[in-house]
Image (cartoon, helix red, strand yellow):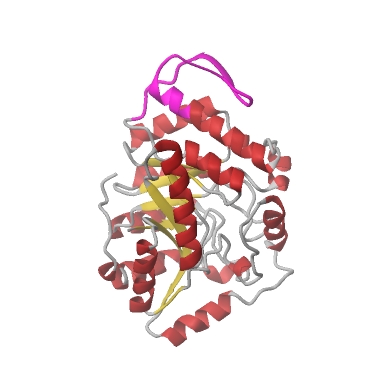
Amino acid sequence: MNLGYWTPVYGGFLRNVGDEEGMAATWASIREVSVTADRLGFHTTLVPELYLNDRKGIDAPSLEAWSLTAAILAVTDRLRVMTAVRPGFHLPAVLAKTVSTLDSIAPGRVALNVVAAWWAEEARQFGGTFTTHDDRYVQAEEFVQVLRGLWGRSPFTFAGDHYELEGTIVEPKPSAQPVVFAGGESEAGKESIARFADAYVMHGGTLDEVRANVADITERSLRIHDRPLREIGMPAYVIVRDTEAEAQRELERITTVDPTSPGYASFEEFQRNSKLSLELTKREYSVGTRGLRPNLVGTPEQVAERIRAYGDAGISLLLIQSSPLKEELERIAEQVFPLVPQGELVH
């Protein structure tokens, strides 16, 4: 398994905890985390693309994903940056050019997470295209077809339901086709992802849920392409402490839910506009992405044992969330890394 982390573009991960996280939505804060993670040997960071802050409330600051990606790649040497992209907010030819340029900055260290956006209010404010749930996956699939076509040959022509290009040239090409991740839980979403994605990233789940999800997406990929997906990733909120009691106290502190907190409205909209395979609890609202569901909470030995079990269940990339992130990544690298076999850092 490769251990990575989730870049907190919103300043922090915790919806019930305010300024005491000490994680400002600033480049200075993200730079410090990025350089530290690169030095410690973390494999990948996922940079989410959100123009409004869904953790701290829509009035709170948050950082733009693609400019942040360029900066992270420029100050790191080994870290792979997987950046989320919502097709409804981008022209695919422009994005293809952006990724090619980023690859010239950091060859082989750029990956994508194609997201069928869920936040209607964000699309309204920023002029993004927000169609029906299933059609957003049709759009995503065409988007990836265009990207791969433009990265593979020049000129490139395409005609689909959402995009048309005639003789489009994108030069230079990336050094290699970037890995395309995608996630979703609906029938239409998973079938589409199995067709267009190289890799799958799911929300956090129990071991049984993850085993079932891995088996499902693997079966689809084998049926369509006669091969499994290259990688399967999952985010998880990690709490490592010297004793289990200390870890449980921290868990209780961050999960005391206040329904009047600024991010609660976006959590409810996420549930309305997503076809989820299970109902989210208000406790899971506390950190998002169902990050507490894997229960990576406890001593280093307990957390490492749980991580190894997820590796056995089919997860090849763990995207850690924790707070405060820099200090917790240092703790995890020191105390958990030696207990968890990891893959190569070469991309």
Residue 188 forms part of the magenta stretch: no
Q: Up-down: is 29 above or below 219?
A: below
Q: Position of residue 119 (x, y in %)?
A: 68, 48
- Which quadrant of the rendered structure holds the N terminus? bottom left
Residue displayed at 38% across by 80% down = 299
- Which quadrant of the rendered structure holds the C terminus? top left
Q: Up-down: is 177 above or below 250?
A: above
Residue displayed at 55% across by 17% down = 165
Q: Up-down: is 319 above or below 192?
A: below
Q: Is residue 201 visible?
A: yes
Q: Position of residue 265 (x, y in %)?
A: 73, 59
Residue displayed at 34% across by 73% down = 305
Does residue 192 appear left or right of residue 273 in this picture? left
Residue displayed at 39% across by 54% down = 34
Q: Which region of the structure is painted magenta?
A: 147-174
Q: Quadrant of residue 161?
A: top right
Q: Position of residue 64 (x, y in %)?
A: 55, 44
Q: How many marks?
A: 0
Q: Is residue 64 visible?
A: no
**Which residue is more in the foreground, 215 or 235?**
215
Q: Position of residue 91 (x, y in %)?
A: 57, 28
**Which residue is more in the foreground, 161 or 301?**
161
